[in-house]
Image: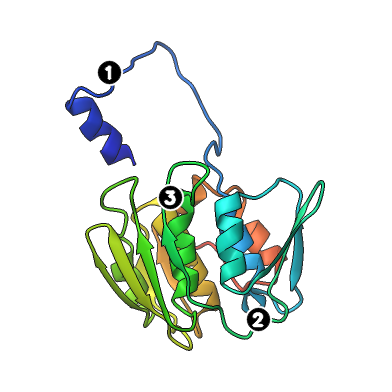
Amino acid sequence: YDEYIRREIANGKYPPYKSSGMAYIRFACEEKELFKLLFMRDRTAEDVNKIEFTDGMDKGAQAKLAEMGVYVEELDEAVIVSAEDVQNFRNVNIKTLPYPGFPTDAAAPFLAAACIASGTSVFIETIFDNRYGYVGELTRFGAHIKAEGRMAVVEGVPSLSGAAVKCTDLRGGAALVIAGLVAEGTTRVENIHYVERGYERLIEKLTALGAKIRRVEEN
């Protein structure tokens, strides 16, 4: 996204805004969809099959979860997401669109989930270019994905295998975390700072779900 904005500024679409002083925005872009995807899959936590979200849920993402076979119930002050009876996700076709369509920021986590869905899933990105930079890393898990231009085709596989991967951006990094949690064996995700800038207390929340995950400081 930062590269996109710099390019648009260079093209004269946006003025290069400047201000004096310093502003600090803490976790301004926290993404809830990552945790919704994690919670709906009981492989990520043996004792967690149903979770309530009191902060609402994007309608486009909610509809696609239902298509994949996930139970979603919207209450007055909460959304319940459950995959208690899901043996395998169903394939899904997703086309990102401006609100109220499917959010582009949720496409990467959904693509990771589609890697272990039954059948073929198709993703079409209509908002930004170069949104599939993380696909090569997902294939290290054994995922079957072909990406070209603004389209990615995912052939679901029964399971993924742990791998050493690197984050290059926030949403793609979220997809790698999801893949690592559902994969068999150990996964090492490098450059995790890309993900942490958008997901507050990531390790703490996943550990509370029963995930075996820890942060390792590099020398």
Q: Which residue is mark 1?
A: 15
Spot occupied by residue 97 in the image (x, y as percentages of width and height): 42, 47
| Horizontal side of residue 14 vs 143, given as left or right | left
Q: Which residue is mark 3?
A: 104
Between residue 184 and residue 155, name the one nearer to us: 155
Name the image quarter holding residue 209.
bottom right
Spot occupied by residue 195 in the image (x, y as percentages of width and height): 47, 53
Q: Is 213 placed above or below 26 here?
A: below
| Horizontal side of residue 147 vs 66, given as left or right | left
Q: Which of marks 3 and 2 precedes in the sequence?
A: 2
Give the label on residue 86, or none.
2
Question: What distance separates the C-alpha of mark 2 from that of mark 1?
Answer: 49 Å
Q: Amino acid at mark 2?
A: Val
Question: What distance separates the C-alpha of mark 1 from that of mark 3?
Answer: 24 Å
Residue 19 visible from this viewpoint: yes
Q: Nearer the viewer, mark 1 or mark 3?
A: 3
Q: Nearer the viewer, mark 2 or mark 1?
A: 2
Q: Secondary structure at mark 1?
A: loop
Callouts 2 and 3 close, C-beta under 8 Å: no
- Residue sitting farthest toward the top: 20
Label 2, residues with CA under 10 Å away: few <14, some 14-19, many ≥20: some
